Image (spheres, rainbow, N blue to C red):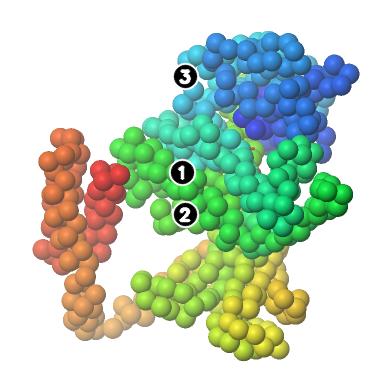
């Protein structure tokens, strides 16, 4: 039997330990919790507590609890815990000891070696402190690997063909984005950027502030000075945030929150995803800016990236996925649990060191996006069949998501819903897999909210239900073979069949026709490309020689395409030049 080396993700908010068993990755649970909260405390009886218990205690006895110690690693400082001073290494060692015990209890044997992950930006001092924390806990740190490297390993970096991957890691307290090159099991971090103080905790804080304001307005009391009530609000805010990742509204009810002037204060309020996403918009913008800086650091543009991997619990926030889709033009991957994929990668690295074989982490995902159509804007024009994705491609199965829609005219008593499978922004270019009507809606003004829920199970059975929010009036259908409608090959075969039909036409006619089409639809592209060139040339005076050289090359390629009226050929170089201009201007 080969020696056991555990893999550890020592996170700012949560930590996990994982191992390889019979070639498969197991993240070991702490009781019924899949993660160990990175909180350390001393309880009433003077005992050390770690994890959820310490996290709960933090709300009431912050002076006896330490959180986010990772932020202090490598600094020459101490923290005070129940009147005693500790180094950051010692506090981290307490977390590591707990993880070691969790692994030992699961395995029924002692463990003495570990692979620990660290952020790519960690300095030597921070890495050294992590190694020391390991030693204090009785673990020899056989290797420290970068977190994005670990995430890439969990996503099967072993493939032979080289891929440029962007790892977007948004956790509870930190944001990191890295560009990595992966090939043959080797992951090279090309660049990293991030913010040590940006994450899900900030999102919670926004909701908390909103709740505080609401209570102030409705009850005239400042809840900030009531620590128990604040603790409940903190918990309620995070729970609402979780719900809003899967549904458009979250109901927040906290009864008997506190007593004010002899009367009980209750909280009851509905928060919409739209309102919540507005609250966090600035934070998401910051992550997108950081993503561009990381790309620039790797001397790449968005169009060079083959895959985007989502890491960290906060990437479950739907607008994160949407923003990345808009930036890169394809769905990011999240099929390996974003909370656990760094720990999984650490275990894979550990197995590689101890010479074990590891299977790739395989999970069931949907290969297609499912959604409906709605009135919207497509290519700058109003369009009645804009595709609205509900369950996204690469989502883990089973999956259930709800979106809200609104009636479009006063007195509308019926909505017709069509369900599509596909990726095209024009719903009519996707595969229609079902349709139904909801009749007898309230006689009210436009804007009557209808929620649509799609629930897709492992067997490809898609349950679709629509509910009039105000009345609860519901209508549903079941689509039996949603996954198998056009599975992989058959979709390709259908495409080929259709393409070959066109191939049978007289080539001369096609040529003439396509020229005509180009002449019409090509004109704006060519004008846009010319404008892009002049904008780029206008920036020459302020760019480095290296950037200028890249720009000149791209301008040459674009000019060749313009001369040849090659509209398709314009796409790539224009996108690259646009990205460079974006960086230079930002
Ligand atoms: P991590 O540091 O990667 O463990 O991420 C923890 C953060 O992810 C915390 O702020 C959580 O509140 C957040 N998180 C976990 N699950 C979800 C979810 N379903 N939707 C939004 N945020 C989540």
Specify whether 59 is left or right of 338: right
Mark 3: give few (<14), some (14-19) or many (20+) Cα within 10 Å.
few
**If the image is split into quadrants, where does the N terminus sit?**
top right
Q: Position of residue 231 (x, y in %)?
A: 75, 40
Q: What number is the disc on residue 123?
A: 3
Which residue in the protein does label 2 denote?
A: 323
Disc 1 marks which residue?
287
Secondary element under disc 2, as helix, strand or loop, is: helix
In the rendered view, would you say 59 is above or below 115?
Answer: below
CA distance for labels 1 and 3: 22 Å
Spatial CA span between label 1 and label 2: 10 Å
Count all numbered tags in the image, as a single digit. 3
Rendered image: mark on residue 556: none
Left or right of 201: which side holds 577?
left
Q: Is residue 499 left or right of residue 465?
A: left
Secondary structure beneath dot 3 equals: loop
**Residue 87: x %, y % from top left:** 64, 12
Tag 1 and tag 3, C-beta contact below 8 Å: no
**Mark 2 neighbour class, 10 Å CA radius: few under 14, some 14 to 19, many 20 or more:** some
Density class for disc 1 (Cα within 10 Å; few <14, some 14-19, many ≥20) is: many
Ligand 1's quadrant is top right
Residue at the image point whose x is 70% and y is 74% from the top? 469
Name the residue at 68% across, 12% down.
86
């Amino acid at each position: 039997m080969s020696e056991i080396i555990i893999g550890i993700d020592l996170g700012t908010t949560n930590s996990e330990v994982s191992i390889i068993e019979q070639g498969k990755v197991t993240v070991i649970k702490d009781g019924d919790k899949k993660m160990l909260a990175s909180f350390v405390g001393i309880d009433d009886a003077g005992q050390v507590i770690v994890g959820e218990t310490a996290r709960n205690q933090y709300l009431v006895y912050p002076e006896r609890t330490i959180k986010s110690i990772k932020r202090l690693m490598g600094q020459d400082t101490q923290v005070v815990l129940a009147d005693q001073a500790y180094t950051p290494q010692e506090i981290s060692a307490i977390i590591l000891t707990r993880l070691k015990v969790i692994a030992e209890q699961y395995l029924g044997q002692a463990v003495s070696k570990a692979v620990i992950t660290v952020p790519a930006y960690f300095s030597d001092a921070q890495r050294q402190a992590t190694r020391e924390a390991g030693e204090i806990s009785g673990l020899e740190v056989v290797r420290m690997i970068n977190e994005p490297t670990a995430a890439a390993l969990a996503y099967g970096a072993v493939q032979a063909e080289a891929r440029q991957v962007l790892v977007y890691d948004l956790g509870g307290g930190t944001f990191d984005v890295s560009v990595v090159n992966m090939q043959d099991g080797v992951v090279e971090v090309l660049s990293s950027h991030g913010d040590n103080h940006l994450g899900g905790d900030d999102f919670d804080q926004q909701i908390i502030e909103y709740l505080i304001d609401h209570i102030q307005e409705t009850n005239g009391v400042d809840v900030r000075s009531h620590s128990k009530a604040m603790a409940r609000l903190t918990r309620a805010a995070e729970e609402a945030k979780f719900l809003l990742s899967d549904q458009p509204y979250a109901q927040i009810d906290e009864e008997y929150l506190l007593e004010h002037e002899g009367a009980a204060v209750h909280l009851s309020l509905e928060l919409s995803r739209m309102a919540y996403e507005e609250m966090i918009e600035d934070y998401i913008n910051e992550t997108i800016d950081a993503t561009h800086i990381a790309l620039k650091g790797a001397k790449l543009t968005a169009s060079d990236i083959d895959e985007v991997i989502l890491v960290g619990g906060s990437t479950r926030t739907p607008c994160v996925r949407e923003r990345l889709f808009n930036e890169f033009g394809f769905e990011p991957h999240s099929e390996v649990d974003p909370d656990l994929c760094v720990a999984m990668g650490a275990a894979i690295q550990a197995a590689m060191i101890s010479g074990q074989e590891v299977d790739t982490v395989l999970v069931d995902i949907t290969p297609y996006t499912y959604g409906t159509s709605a009135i919207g804007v497509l290519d700058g024009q109003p369009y009645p069949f804009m595709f609205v994705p509900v369950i996204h491609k690469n989502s883990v199965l089973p999956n259930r998501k709800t979106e809200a829609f609104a009636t479009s005219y006063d007195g509308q008593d019926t909505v017709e819903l069509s369900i599509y499978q596909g990726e095209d922004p024009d719903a009519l270019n996707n595969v229609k897999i079902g349709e139904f009507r909801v009749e007898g809606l309230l006689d009210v003004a436009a804007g009557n909210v209808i929620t649509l829920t799609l629930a897709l199970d492992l067997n490809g059975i898609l349950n679709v239900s629509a509910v009039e929010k105000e009345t609860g009036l519901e209508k549903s259908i079941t689509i039996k073979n949603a996954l198998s409608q056009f599975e992989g090959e058959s979709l390709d075969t259908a495409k080929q069949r259709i393409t070959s039909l066109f191939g049978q036409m007289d080539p001369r006619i096609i040529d003439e026709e396509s020229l005509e089409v180009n002449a019409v639809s090509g004109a704006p592209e060519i004008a846009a490309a010319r404008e892009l060139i002049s904008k780029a040339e206008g920036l020459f005076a302020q760019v480095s020689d290296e950037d200028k050289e890249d720009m000149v090359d791209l301008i040459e390629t674009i000019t060749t395409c313009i001369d040849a009226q090659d509209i398709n050929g314009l796409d790539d170089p224009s996108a690259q030049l646009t990205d460079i201009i974006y960086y230079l201007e930002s």
